[in-house]
Amino acid sequence: MQLSSYEDLRSRLFSHEITCEEVVRFYLERIENHRNDNIYITVFSESAIERARELDRKLREGESVGKLFGMPMAIKDNIAIKGGRLTCASKILENYESVYDATAVLRLAEEDAIFLGKTNMDEFAMGSSNENSAFGNVPNPFDKKRVPGGSSGGSAAAVASGLAMVALGSDTGGSVRQPAGFCDIVGMKPTYGRISRYGLVAFASSFDQIGVLARNCDDVALVLGVMAGKDKHDATSSLHEVPDYSSEMATVSVEGLRIGIPKEYFPETLNPDVSRIVKGKLAELQDQGAELVAITLPDSEYAIAAYYILVTAEASSNLARFDGARYGYRSENSEDLAAMYVNSRTEGFGREVKRRIMLGTYVLSAGYYDTYYKKAQQVRRVFQDRYREALEKVDVIAGPTSPFPPFGIGDKTENPLDMYLADVFTVPASIVGMPAVSVPLGFDSQNLPVGMHLICNFFEEAKLLGIARHMQRSL
């Protein structure tokens, strides 16, 4: 069954060429055939088929159907679906079942999407390679010896492997965009507050945002439009009007587009293949009428340092709730209450999560709060001002999604600082809260995917997707 896009699927469903049940069974069979790739933590086989049958009935009987009628979707396992496991790929939540639906999930369900299952990820979304999961790592669909990126590696691999048409991920510092770049698909992080975080398990609350992964920009625009908008359950969700992304995206032209090229995004250490492919695409856009504008974003080298101070501080606070007392994993090797807390967290959390909790506790401690946390917040404000200023001169900021192609499984696990640098180009958009997208550009000399990263001003998702769509179609 060849399905190029949701538009293709929808037309075939409405013409009765295929049914929702046939589509779901097709995807479930593919998921089973790829079981060894460890992409899904939980598969909703029975409920997905039941849901498909109900949608087929609605269509047969002439009832109105939603914008996402029959769309087979995967959901990252840190987003709540009522009655389904919500593990965050952690031992501490291994058998926990959600008691409510995330707002994003509810809005998708109301438009008749079908959920195939929950995808693997780095534990509590902490990682850049999907190697930190308590359920094992996920291989890259293009080279099984390499990583798919993280933390939404399972969602990216599901879309790239044809195990879902569209997937939800979460993006804190690049966790949707970087795996999208590593898996040759589109990955979008919208403006902070564009999508409700209600039902998204918190890692760093002032950074976290649900994002969308798909093979094409049209599907991203459609799903984004359904999820976006104010939510009474999330005070940080924005009142900003939700446009028709699909319509607005189609009006975007490359002619006269001013593309900002920061010199800081093309250091000497950048992988030569990545540099060549990204610069080649920029030259193509210039030939098509775009204007390439050299810009500078001073002090970009401090982005990673500021980011990891801030997110670890927030993580140490957010993860305090997982203590073995109320729900989740509880250690059996405890003689008193204090030991139960310590042992449950020690045994339940993985190494990277414990590392970040300890770092966050340290930077928030009385002796170091001003030195680290306060200073990082000041740096964050400087970045916001500089990106605003840059985007007054250009329409979009462009560069590589990652400084290197997908790396080997195990190559960076013993060097956390080297691993953190995988997000060096995606972190700034998260620091400032602006929308950003990774667009696939093709493959390097080793047949590994390379992506381009685009950043626009607040709430300019339609412009961003329009540019990305043009780039995809010109490949």
Image (tube, helix red, strand yellow):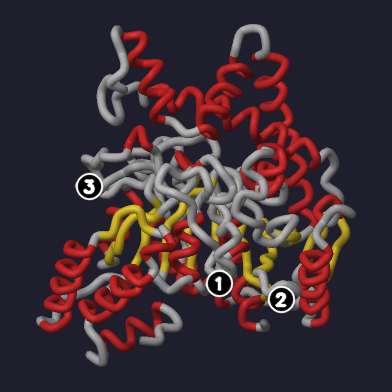
Quarter of the picture containing the C terminus is bottom right
Q: Earlier in the sequence, mark 2 or mark 3?
A: 3
Side (left or right) of 437 relative to 139: right
Evaluate if marks 2 and 1 touch, with contact meaning CB atoms under 8 Å apart: no
| Residue 136 x %, y % | 45, 49
| Residue 94 x %, y % | 31, 39
User: What amino acid is labelled 3 in the image?
Assistant: Lys
**Circle number at residue 472:** none
Q: Secondary structure at mark 1?
A: helix
Side (left or right) of 108 relative to 151: left
Vertically, is 94 above or below 453? above
Between marks 2 and 3, how big is the CA–CA gap?
A: 43 Å
Q: Earlier in the sequence, mark 1 or mark 3?
A: 3
| Residue 430 x %, y % | 61, 44
Between marks 1 and 3, how big is the CA–CA gap?
A: 33 Å
Residue under label 3, please give it: 82
User: What amino acid is labelled 2 in the image?
Assistant: Val
Neighbourhood count class around disc 1 (C-alpha, 10 Å): few under 14, some 14–19, many 20 upward:
many
Q: Is residue 295 visible?
A: yes
Residue 306 occupies which quadrant of the picture? top right
**Circle number at residue 254:** 2
Q: Earlier in the sequence, mark 2 or mark 1?
A: 1
Residue under label 1, please give it: 249
Give 158 or 59, whichever is nearer the viewer. 158
Q: Is residue 205 visible?
A: no
Between marks 2 and 1, how big is the CA–CA gap?
A: 12 Å
The residue that appears at 18% across and 62% down in the rendered structure is 47
